[in-house]
Image: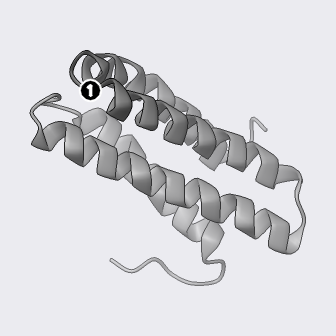
Amino acid sequence: MSTFVTYEVALELLGELRSIIEIVGKHDSNLADQMKRAGTSVVLNLSEGIRRQRGNQQRAYEIAHGEARELLGALDVAAAWGYVLDASVARSRLDRLLGLLWGLTHPGRKRAR
C-alpha cells in the first residue's frame, strides 16, 4: 500500500488530526469521537478498496469520500463552536485528500474548480 498516494495522505491527515481531536474532546466528546471514527473509516475503506474489484471497489472509495466530507463538516463545527482556532494544516491535507478521493470516485472526469 505504500505506493497508494491517497492512502498515505489519509494516514498523514490522521496524524494532523490527533491533536485537534484531543482539543475538541475537552469540549465535546461526541464530536471528537465522531471525528476519530470518520478518520478511521476513511483509511479502512481505502485499504479495503485496494483489494476489491470494480463496483465493490468504487463503493469502498465512495464511503471513504463521504467520511472525509464528514471530517470537513466536523472541523467546521469545531471552528464554529470555537474549540479549534487554527486547523489550517489539517484542512490543507484534507482538501488534498478530498481531491484525490474525488478522482477515485469520478474516474475519467476532471475535478470542477
Say left or right for 60 vs 27: right
Q: Is residue 49 above or below residue 14?
A: below
Q: Residue at x 51, y 81 (%)?
A: 110
Q: How many marks?
A: 1
Across and down, in percent, residue 105 comes to 62, 71
37 and 84: which one is in front? 37
The N terminus appears in which quarter of the rendering?
A: top right
The image position of residue 14, as x and y in percent, is 49, 29
Where, by quadrant of the figure, is residue 33 drawn? top left
Q: Judge left or right: residue 97 versus residue 40.
A: left
Against 75, residue 86 (above or below) is above
- The quarter of the image holding the C terminus is bottom left
Q: Residue at x 26, y 18 (%)?
A: 23
Secondary structure under tag 1 reads loop
Q: Position of residue 107 (x, y in %)?
A: 66, 78
Q: Is residue 67 above or below residue 47?
A: below
Q: Is 30 in front, or is 59?
A: 30
The residue at the far bottom in this view is 109
Front-most of residues 63 and 8: 63
**Mark 1 closeness class: few <14, some 14–19, many ≥20 residues within 10 Å:** some
Q: Is residue 27 above or below residue 67?
A: above
- At 39% from the left and 80% from the top, the residue drawn is 112
Give the residue furthest to the front.
30
Q: Residue at coordinates 26% horizontally, 26% vertically from top-left?
A: 28
Task: Tell which of 8 and 64 is nearer to you.
Answer: 64
- Percent across and percent down for residue 61 are 67, 60
Q: What residue sits right under mark 1 in the picture?
A: 28
- Amino acid carrying mark 1 in the image: Asp
Type of colouring: one colour
Q: Seen in the image, is 100 located left or right of residue 75? A: right
